[in-house]
Amino acid sequence: MPAECDVRIRMYAQMARSRYFEEAIKVAYLEGKQPLFNMAKGPIPGEMHLSSGQEPCAVGVCAHLRPDDTVTATHRAHHIAIAKGVALNAMAAEIFGKRDGLSGGRGGHMHLFDAGVNFCCSGIVAQGMGPAVGAALAAKLGGSDAVAVSFIGEGAANQGAFHESLNLAAVWKVPVVFVIEDNAWGISVAKRASTAIERNSDRAASYGMPGSFVADNDIDAIYAAAGEAIQRARAGGGPTLIEIETWRLEGHFMGDAEGYRPSGEVAALQTRDPLIVYRQRLAAAGVSTAELESIEGRELRAVTDALQFARKSDYPAAESAFDTVFS
Amino acid sequence: MTATTTAATARRLTIAKAMSEAIGQSMDADPKVIVLGEDIGALGGVFGTTQGLLERFGAGRVRDTPISETAFIGAAVGLAAAGMRPVVELMFVDFFGVCMDAIYNLAAKQSYFSGGHVCCPLVLMTSVGGGYGDAGQHSQCLYATFAHLPGLKVVMPSNAYDAKGLMLSAIADANPVVFMFHKALQGMGWLGTVPGSIVHVPQEMYEVPIGKAATVRPGRDITLVGLGLTVHLALQAATTLAAEGIEAEVIDLRTIAPLDHGAVAVSVAKSRRLIVVDDDYRSFGVSAEVIAGACESGVDWLAAPARITHPDVPIPYSPALEHPLLPSAAKIVELSRQLCRGGAV
């Protein structure tokens, strides 16, 4: 069942914001890295894992979440952070390594924390899952109906932490939803070469929890599946595993030559770009072009403002590196 | 490069190519050598350590793994016990947290707990080091974390010649060897590379012995001890110091465990001044171990031994925060001046 109209419009706006953010970051990231690509150069150093194409997973799930719900995410987390409501200006400033960033430049792109909306991410595969179980247990013990959602990639389903966390969550019957963004690639290794079964959602049965699979990167179907799981979690029904077929429109990281990827794969996925697909779907449902353009303009301005804020912010004082090692 | 190597015969390789060559030659020579790890097949390793191996030896011996370090490093221990010689890659040393049990409780203790009846000829190669803005889950060194543990040997080359020779020694060794390679030296274009790491590498197989440091620059006034990247910083500092009349001796540890305390002792007996340069965290690390060993050798110091390290702070992301924390040639020059001009302790 498609989400109601205002929810769908809000989801389109978030998808657009997320995509515009990645496109703006991509441009900024490449500054200083051309013609010779060197990861250390330019205003944004280090690895950069862009989420373009995976927006429906984040937006469709987080549309059901409140600020007091917890989200743990991955190394590829910008879309999830945005969908969870992480402060956009501070997030951009963090990625630029600036003083006004979420953590004053200490964490950067792979280590975004926003306590205001209970969001965090890390660069270690599958390691957000245990903390999500803990957040869910804390909610349960505290008598709240808040939930936790742990986003992972399909590669993480082959980590010990995946299996341990599913079991623990089921044993404790805590309000947590595990969301697999299956983009079919673990860096250069195809899912079929690394994973013994076709559908990771089938693994839910091993731990006595419901598992569902959403095909085709379809945000309305994701919204429906996540709604059911989150409602069950809030009502005390325990954990759920959701697997979403999504696509990675960029390399594993910026600078990835992607020689391992079959030729034409990315081009084929681009013809099914979820942002374009959803725009068409909303238009067909009667949303006017003027309204869509108005949303796009507003979201693009928010992103432009955030990057401008990030660029204008000062670098942190070197001595601040020694702060906050301990609380 | 030796003085007799002419430009015409020089084969200047990156560390990545030298490692790949060493593994490939070992695989040619011994069918028991196999390679396991994430993205080591078609990609040739994220850091280029297995270039061309899949094409030459096939997917049976060059095995891409799932993101399952606990399982595949554990499998490498089992392979080694069964007489194979696995070379296994842990993509970033920072990822050891998910698989340390197989490394320090299984591999490191296999020989001892079996009374020497079951050996563990395993090479664990892993990338270390920061300076490029990847923050503290992808930039750590953690030399001491591994070197602390009995039963593990730990090596790290500063150049491609040593990389090939140490890799061949590591594969031939009957024991688990952690082969660390520094990202700033690796020769991957996208990371930048210190030019001094790219040197002549002979085509034939040769070994650089594990446990032997190298004196890479002679000098009478002060001993600078480094490893991996910091060797190059020390050499750069030594050039500056020489112009001021201070002759620094530079020692490349090459092996972290077992540490070549003897080589340091010989040098400091002469120079009576010591600076250890280590890009790992400061406390309980390589710098402390080198200084302790030097003190135990009974040196009559002209100045208290000193160290330049990354401080005890998780490696931050912003270049404005990270860069000032890293060892540098300028820091070595400054501290060397203090030690050489500061008078006796």
Image (cartoon, coloured by chain):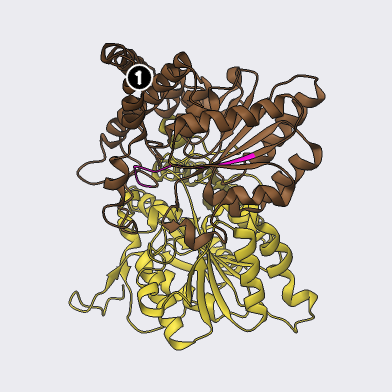
Chain colours: A brown, B yellow
Q: Which residues are magenta?
A: A241-251
Residue B333 rendering spot, x and y as whole percentages: 41, 44
Residue at the limit of the structure toward the left, as seen here: B8
User: In the image, is residue B216 above or below residue B246?
Assistant: below
User: In the image, is residue B256 above or below residue A184?
Assistant: below
Disc 1 residue crowd, few under 14, some 14–19, many 20+, Cα 10 Å: many
Q: Residue at x 54, y 25 (%)?
A: A62
> In which quarter of the view is residue A299 placed?
top left
Of B327 and B84, which appears nearest the observer?
Answer: B84
Of A241 and B71, which appears nearest the observer?
Answer: A241
Q: Residue at x 43, y 32 (%)?
A: A55
Residue A161 in sight from this viewpoint? no
Q: Amino acid at mark 1?
A: Val
User: In the image, is residue A55 above or below residue A282?
Assistant: below
Of B118 and B308, which appears nearest the observer?
Answer: B118
Compared across the picture, whether B107 is left or right of A15 comes to right
Residue A143 in sight from this viewpoint? yes
Please report, as a chain letter, where disc 1 is located: A
Count of marks overlaid on the render: 1
Residue B25 rendering spot, x and y as whole percentages: 41, 82
User: In the image, is residue B215 above or below residue A315?
Assistant: below
Q: Is residue A250 highlighted in magenta?
A: yes
Compared across the picture, whether A269 is left or right of B114 comes to left
Residue B45 rendering spot, x and y as whole percentages: 42, 62
Q: Residue at x 73, y 48 (%)?
A: A207
Residue picked out by circle 1: A303
Residue A154 rendering spot, x and y as whole percentages: 53, 48
Q: Is residue B88 highlighted in magenta?
A: no
Of B23 and B8, which appears nearest the observer?
Answer: B23
